[in-house]
Amino acid sequence: MTPSRRNFLSNGAVAFVAAGGVSRASAALLPEAASQSSPVTQAPRAPSSGRPYNPVVTLNGWTLPFRMKDGVKEFHLVAEPVVRELAPGMTARLWGYNGQSPGPTIEVVEGDRVRLFVTNRLPEHTTIHWHGQRLPNGMDGVGGLTQPQIQPGKTYVYEFVARRSGTFMYHPHADEMTQMAMGMMGLWVTHPKDPSFMPVDRDFVFLLSNYDIDPGSATPKVNTMLDFNLFTFNSRVFPGIDPLVCRLGDRVRIRIGNLTMTNHPIHLHGHEFVVTGTDGGWVPPSARWPEVTTDVAVGQMRAIEFEASEPGDWAFHCHKSHHTMNAMGHEVPTMIGVDHQGLVEKIQKLVPDYMVMGDRGMADMGEMEMPLPDNTLPMMTGTGPHGPIEMGGMFTTVKVRRDQRPGDYKDPGWYRARKDSIAYEWSGESAPVSRAQAAPEDVRTLSVRRKGGHASHE
C-alpha cells in the first residue's frame, strides 16, 4: 500500500510561510504563500469565497489557497528548491513551487480576474508561462520576449481574466531545459461558470514528468535530451503513486498534462473512456469516440471520462514499457536464451554481489533483492495481492468499490475478487513444455547490394 492509505490529509495540513527575498513593506501587501511538503494526495479544496465550483483532486498533490481582494482572486507562487520523495526509499532534489514539485494546482472559475504574485527564490532568474491561456501578451511569461526575467529575490505580478474553462499548465520560459528538467511545473484548472456543466463525481488531475537521476544520486541531470530513466505521475513513481479511488457508478474525469520530452499513450484497463477535453477546450459529445488508450503528446492536455462500472483494481499506466520501469535497465543486454549454468559461481568469485539478470526477460528484476546504492529505486517494484506487479514509473490503479462513500478518496486496500472469477491454472492434460532453443548459428543475415548514386534506383 502507498503511504496515503494511512496519511490522507485534510486541507488543514497546508502550512503558510513568508516569501523570502521580499521586502517587509512588499510582504505586507502580498498574499501569504502556502507551502506543502507532504507527497500524499490532499482532499479536494472547496472554494472559501468567490463563485462556486466542483474542486479537483490533484494526484499526490494539492490546490493552492487564494484570497479575494477587491473582486480579484489572488495567489502567491514561490519558485524555490524543494525535496520531493519520488517513492519511499528515494528523494530527489528538485526545483518547484511552494514546497513541492510539481507546484500546487491553481483552481479558478471562468471569468475570474486573477492576480498571481510570483517570487523567485531560485539561484537564477525565471519566469512563468501560463500554458494554454488567452491573456494579454505581456502576461504570457516568455523571458526576453514579453517580459524581463524575474531575478533571484524579486517578485513579479501577473494579472488577467481566465477567459475559458478547461485544463491548463504553468511552467518557466526561462532557462527552461534546466528548470523543467528540475521539475518546475504545475496545473491550472478553470472551472465553467455553470457548475452543472459536464458534472462528474470524481475529477482527478496530474502531470506527466520525467527525470534523469543516476542510481545513488538525488539531483537530475539537466542536460539529458531524451534518455530519461524515471517517468512519473506528479513527480511520483509506482508504488509511490496513489490509486485513483472511485465509487461504483461514479462518473469519473481524469485530466492529464504532459511536460516530458516524449509522448505517453495512457491506457486504462477494464473500462472504455472518451476524450472530453483537449488544450483547445471541451470536445462536443458528437465528436467523441470510445477509447482505452489515449496518446498525450508533448505539451498537451487531455481530459478523459468514463463510468466506473466495473468493481476491482484496474491498471492505469503509460503503455511505453520503459516508462513503467525505474532507473537502470535501458542499456541492460538481452540475456534471454543464455545458459548461465555454472557461470554465476565463477563470476561471484571475482564479484561477490553479482546476480544474473534477465535470463527470463526483465521479470527477474521484479523479484530480485539486488544490492543498490542508497537513494535508488529498484526497477519494477510494487507487490500486489498475487505477487510482484513488475511495473514502476508511470503506473497506478483505478480502484472501483461499491461501498466507497461519496467524496471518500481513502485507499480501500486490494480488491477481493471471488475465487471463481480469477484466472486459474489448467489442471488437465498438457503437452510437455521444453525450454525454447536458441536460433541455429548458420542463420544467414539478409544482405543488400547497393549501387552508387540516386541514378541507380530501380
Image (cartoon, rainbow, N blue to C red):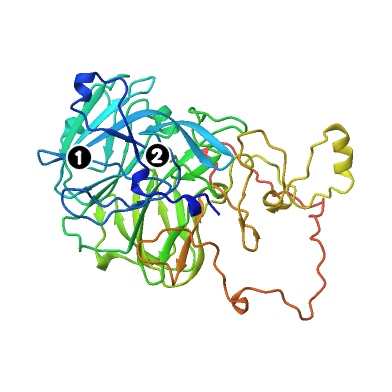
Q: Which mark is residue 102?
A: 2
**Would you say 80 lies left or right of 448 here?**
left
- 439 and 354: which one is in front? 354
Q: Is residue 294 visible?
A: yes
The location of residue 257, given as percent across then percent down, is: 37, 47
The location of residue 34, given as percent across then percent down, is: 31, 36
Q: Which residue is mark 1?
A: 67
Under mark 1, the amino acid is Arg
Q: The residue tagged with tag 1: helix, strand or loop?
A: strand
Q: Are marks 1 and 2 in contact (CB under 8 Å)?
A: no
Instruction: Tell which circle, 1 or 2, labels the residue nearer the N-terminal end.
Output: 1
**Would you say 315 lies left or right of 137 here?**
right
| Location of residue 446 with respect to 401 vertically, above or below | above
Which corner quadrant holds the N terminus? bottom right
The residue that appears at 26% across and 60% down in the rendered structure is 283
Figure quadrant of residue 385: bottom right
Q: How far apart are the two marked residues, 1 and 2, measured between alpha carbons?
A: 22 Å
As drawn, which residue projects farthest toward the bottom? 428
| Location of residue 261 with respect to 82 vertically, above or below | below
The local crowd at label 2, few if under 14, some if 14 to 19, many if 20 or more residues have their Cα within 10 Å, is many
